Image: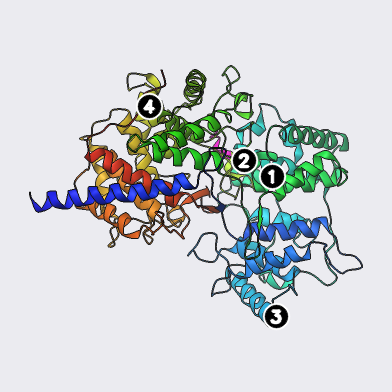
Amino acid sequence: MSPRTQVEDSLLAGSAQAAQRGMRWLLENQHEQGYWWADLTADATLESDWILLQLWLHAPVNGVWNPPNRPLIDKAVRSILERQLPDGGFHIYPKGPSEISATVKAYFALKLAAGAEGVSPDEFTEALDRAKDRILALGGIQAANSYTKINLSFFNLYPREGCPSVPPEMWLLPGNFMYQMSSWTRAIVTPLSIVHALNPQRPVPAGFDLREIFAPNVPVTYQRHEKLFSWPNLFLAGDKLLKGWERWGLKSVRQRAIRRAEQWMLERTRYTDGLGAIYPPMQYMIMALDLLGYPADHPDRVEAQTQFDRLMVATDDDFYFQPCFSVVWDAAIAAFALGDADDDPEIDAALRRCADWLLTKEVRRKGDWSVKRPKTEPSGWYFEFANEFYPDIDDTAMVLLALRKSRASNPSGQQACEQRASQWLLDMQSKDGGWAAFDVDNNWRPLSFMPFADHNAMLDPTCPDITGRVLEALCACGLDRSHKAIQRGIDYLIRTQEADGSWYGRWGVDYIYGTFLALRGLQAAGESELEAHVQRALEWVRSIQNFDGGWGESCASYDNNTYTNAPSTPSQTAWAILALLAGGDTRSSSLHDGIEYLLKTQTSDGTWDEELATGTGFPGVFYLCYHLYRHSFPLLALNTFVRTKQGRTSVQNCVR
């Protein structure tokens, strides 16, 4: 036996053992209802915004702020302080640099909550001084994003004239204007437009202001673009007109717009866990209902507050908010990773329980997506426990892949569900051949230049990562490249490959994620491993491997528009391994070193540790730590490696 064969046999045996430990952990941590679910965490901006909401809900009395939930506010303050960086700022992803908006929000929250229990005055003063210095070094409060300024303007802490208008009249525009925005932006700006239109001027504690973090000699208003005839300047001109309209426009039109926005907002709280089932619109809805006169005990207001509070995690040791619940997503990935193993009665039973639960989460009502696809039968899956208006194309593909390797208690029901979901995916293909997250052809680029579009997520364009996963799912359901949709998807991936051989990843960090999913989609569609674009991708993956054998990528890739190295992580290493295997690389030293990295970093309980953010919310603005990624993806990589080396094929047939 050659030395190389001995190494491969050793890696194969080690991988099988490590996979067994990983599968045991998942089996032991399956919820009774059949799903897998772990925390989804982000940065300190959620806790900071929550403190702002407490000021909104509990106004100062005689200039003194003494909210009834002071113990929770004290915990939030401690949570924020623990994340302050040595330079005084706050980041938006672990190990990242200070970011101006996150730092401004934290400064506001800390200053407002001064005197928190367990925090000495000296510690508070020192933390605020360092944050103030960092804010000024980053350009002052004027450099913060529009949503930060808008929030502060509600309390007269930032001039309203320096904030973009968010008019509810957008709901009165023709051509389904609001549906040209991404689904999450639509959910955010609708309640925000109500709040903005009603122009609250909420009180702050006596003597409280933020003057010290305004950079001197820097204007508070938006500046014109250097190119006279440009979309930014057009929208800035429009914003000036809107500010005039707010003063002198027809009040009847504004009231009609507010009522239309209110109606839309309330309709989308049915069959869902809060508006959009994500933090920002849920927060703004509470504020909007308050301004609209809904008393605290009104059922709609109680429901909005209850769903928002569910995102809070408060224990003796921790306090943080989840931006949403990732349960369907977590469950599907975990089931897919388990399903790549050999047949095992215990695993089969676990997958059956998960499949039964997933089938109960299929969407059977028309949502916002149906505006552009009115004749399509509803199907698909959302991301959270309940979010019927917003099935997610990515989640739907992932659930279908999980169901390919599971057998529900009702096979005929599973088959019908899969057929509906597959057709829904086909109908949701965009004109360019790719797939987006929630909508079809949601790519009207001028919207990205609107003054309140600096959250970098006004649109939901197609992307290689989702397109790759959808191709894999559809091909698992029996389609091949002879189908027009599959060929268009292949063409899209070839066309969107980067010059260095990688693919952009919109929903995971970043190029490693996009490349892994693009290659798996091409493999499933029958693309030859010998094609130049496949070989270029493999060379790129091998070229960025770290010295420890793993792979890592920083969230800074989104800012730099190119791969930016970071310390190795289990999930990104797993993605790179899966990319190599999908491209036909089954024996390279890069592959072996990557497998070895996963073996040596696995913990004694069969899991992996991961500190860095590998999930993406809004590129350049908001990042996510999926706490189940570090378990599910390494397990998937190890099981795929074992299956590939043993010459087994994946279960890819539809239920018959």
What amino acid type is highlighted by mark number 1?
Answer: Pro
In three-dimensional space, the C-alpha distance between marks 4 and 1, rounded to whole angstroms, equals 36 Å
Categorize mark 4 by other alpha carbons within 10 Å: few (<14), some (14-19), many (20+): many
Q: Most extreme residue toward the right, as rendered?
A: 62
For label 3, the crowd category at 10 Å Cα-Cα, with few meaning under 14, some 14 to 19 and many 20 or more, is few
* Amino acid at pointer 2: Trp
Which is nearer the N-term, disc 2 or disc 1? 2
Report x, y in % for residue 285.
75, 44
In the rendered view, tell whether residue 144 sits above or below residue 179.
Answer: below
Q: Earlier in the sequence, mark 3 or mark 4?
A: 3
Q: In which quadrant is the C terminus drawn? A: top left
* Residue furthest bottom as drawn: 122
Residue at mark 4:
476
Tell me: 201 left or right of 450: right
Is residue 444 located in the magenta-colored stretch of the structure?
yes
Residue numbers of the magenta segment: 441-446
User: What is the C-alpha distance between the residues marked 3 and 4?
Assistant: 59 Å
- Alpha carbon separation for disc pair 2 and 4: 29 Å
Whether residue 86 is visible to the viewer of this picture, yes or no, is yes
